[in-house]
Image (cartoon, rainbow, N blue to C red):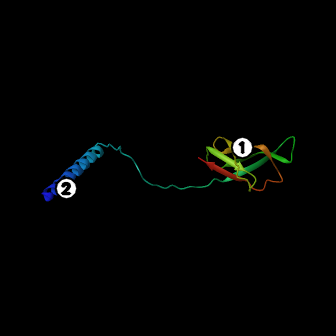
């Protein structure tokens, strides 16, 4: 008689497990996933040529650089510049006609600390 009860328990456990598995499947079967895109690509990154560089000194303190102007060889929409190589701060610049750039330093940069013009530009 114990065998019969043991088999009944095993059958009962299997029925419950099957019901739970079917219920879990029912929940996952109703998921909707929208389409998506994935991919990879590449493009050439070319640098700008900077020319016609001119530094404007502060009218009151001529030992300070007030601004720098320069021309880029291709159109840009954003430009930033710095004149102190050890600095991590770039100054936002204005662009006229896509290629004529003016960067106003605020505060002004002491001429004695200016050691390198570094320009970042993007189109």
Q: Tell me the residue that label 1 is attached to.
A: 102
Quadrant into which the N terminus falls: bottom left
In this rendering, position of residue 34 left or right of residue 66:
left
Eyeballing the image, is 38 above or below 3? above
Residue at 87 percent across and 43 percent down: it is 61
Q: Tell me the residue that label 2 is attached to.
A: 10
Is residue 73 shown to the viewer in this render? Answer: no
Q: Secondary structure at mark 1?
A: strand
Q: Earlier in the sequence, mark 2 or mark 1?
A: 2
Give the percent coordinates (x, y) of residue 28: 30, 46
Residue at 22 percent across and 49 percent down: it is 16
Is residue 100 shown to the viewer in this render? Answer: yes
Eyeballing the image, is 35 above or below 41? above
Distance between the Cα atoms at labels 2 and 1? 83 Å
Nearer to the camera, 27 or 55:
27
Give the percent coordinates (x, y) of residue 45: 56, 55
Few, some or many C-alpha atoms within 10 Å of disc 1 (few <14, some 14-19, many ≥20)?
many
Give the percent coordinates (x, y) of residue 111: 83, 51
Q: Secondary structure at mark 2?
A: helix
């Amino acid at each position: 008689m114990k065998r019969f009860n043991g088999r009944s328990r095993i059958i009962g456990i299997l029925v419950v497990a099957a019901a739970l598995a079917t219920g879990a499947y029912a929940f996952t079967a109703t998921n909707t996933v929208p389409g998506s895109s994935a991919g990879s690509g590449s493009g050439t990154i070319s640098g700008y040529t900077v020319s016609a560089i001119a530094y404007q000194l502060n009218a009151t303190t001529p030992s300070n650089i007030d601004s720098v102007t320069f021309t880029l060889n291709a159109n840009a929409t954003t430009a930033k510049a710095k004149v102190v190589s050890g600095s991590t701060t770039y100054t936002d610049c204005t662009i006229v006609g896509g290629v004529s750039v003016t960067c106003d330093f605020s505060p002004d940069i002491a001429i004695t600390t200016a050691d390198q013009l570094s320009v970042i530009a993007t189109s």
